[in-house]
Image (spheres, helix red, strand yellow):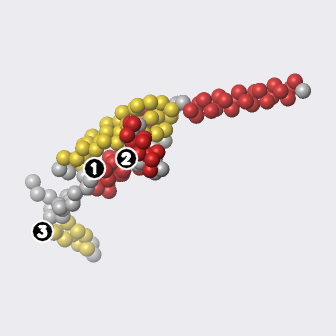
C-alpha cells in the first residue's frame, strides 16, 4: 500500500509523485557510534549512578584518562534495526522500574532521531546499587552529632 505525499502551498494541497525516503541507503553507522549516543542518553537519566562496563572497559578508562561514553552498552545492528543492551548501576533510593523505563525511552528516541535506525529493543540490566551517597550522608550526620556532643561537654 503506497502512501501519497502531500505539501501545502498557499493554502492549496499539492500531491507529490516521488516518494520521500527516510532510510540510510549507502550510509553505515558503526555500533560504537550508536553506543556513544545511547551512553549520553543514559547519563542524562536521573537515578543512574554509573555504567557497568566490565574489567576491560575500566582499564581503558583509567589508562586513557577519558570517560568512555559507550561503557556498559552493547549494540547489535542488523540492517536498519538496532537492539541495545544497557548495563547500569542505580543510585540507592531510586525507583528502579522508573529509571529503567526512562532509559528505554531516552535511548530509543536519541538513537532513532540521530541515526534513522529503528530501535527494536532497549534492554536495561541493573548490575548494582550505589550506596556511597547514603554512607556519606550518614557520616556527615554522625560528624555533626559528635561536634554537638563535644560542644555540650565543654
| Residue 96 position (above or below residue 118) | above
Q: Position of residue 87 (x, y in %)?
A: 37, 37
Classify residue 76 as left or right of residue 124: left
**Residue count near mark 3 (Cα–Cα under 10 Å), binned few <14, some 14–19, many ≥20:** few
Sequence-first disc among 2 and 3? 3
The reply to whether dot 2 and dot 1 touch (C-beta < 8 Å) is no
What secondary structure is found at the residue carrying circle 3?
Answer: loop
Which mark's residue is nearer the viewer, 1 or 3? 1
Query: Could one spot residue 15 in this view of the protein?
Result: yes
Q: Position of residue 7 (x, y in %)?
A: 23, 68
- For the view shown, which residue lies furthest in the right direction? 154
Instruction: Kindly identify which numbered label has been placed on residue 31.
Output: 1
The reply to whether dot 1 and dot 3 touch (C-beta < 8 Å) is no
Classify residue 103 as left or right of residue 30: right
Marks 1 and 3, how far apart at CA: 35 Å
**Residue count near mark 1 (Cα–Cα under 10 Å), binned few <14, some 14–19, many ≥20:** some
Q: Quadrant of residue 58?
A: top left
Instruction: Kindly identify which numbered label has been placed on residue 17.
Output: 3
The reply to whether dot 2 and dot 3 touch (C-beta < 8 Å) is no
Sequence-first disc among 1 and 3? 3
| Residue 20 position (above or below residue 98) | below
Classify residue 30 as left or right of residue 151: left
Which mark's residue is nearer the viewer, 2 or 3? 2
Question: Disc 2 designates what residue?
Answer: 70
| Image quadrant in which the C terminus is located | top right
Q: Between residue 22 and residue 13, name the one nearer to us.
A: 22
- For the view shown, which residue lies furthest in the bottom direction? 10
| Residue 124 position (above or below residue 153) | below
| Image quadrant in which the N terminus is located | bottom left
Residue in the image at 48% along x and 41% along y: 46
Instruction: Report the number of numbered marks.
Output: 3
Amino acid at each position: 500500500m503506497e502512501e501519497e505525499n502531500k505539501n501545502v502551498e498557499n493554502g492549496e494541497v499539492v500531491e507529490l509523485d516521488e516518494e520521500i525516503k527516510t532510510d540510510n541507503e549507502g550510509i553505515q553507522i558503526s555500533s560504537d557510534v550508536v553506543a556513544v549516543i545511547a551512553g549520553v542518553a543514559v547519563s542524562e537519566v536521573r537515578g543512574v549512578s554509573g555504567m557497568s562496563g566490565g574489567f576491560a572497559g575500566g582499564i581503558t578508562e583509567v589508562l586513557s584518562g577519558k570517560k568512555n561514553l559507550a561503557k556498559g552498552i552493547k549494540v547489535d545492528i542488523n540492517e536498519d534495526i538496532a537492539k541495545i543492551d544497557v548495563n547500569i548501576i542505580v543510585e540507592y533510593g531510586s525507583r528502579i522500574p522508573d529509571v529503567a523505563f526512562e532509559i528505554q525511552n531516552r535511548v530509543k528516541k536519541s538513537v532513532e532521531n540521530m541515526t534513522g535506525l529503528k530501535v527494536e529493543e532497549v534492554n536495561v540490566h541493573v548490575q548494582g546499587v550505589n550506596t556511597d551517597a547514603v554512607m556519606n550522608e550518614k557520616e556527615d550526620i554522625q560528624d555533626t552529632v559528635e561536634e554537638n556532643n563535644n560542644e555540650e561537654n565543654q
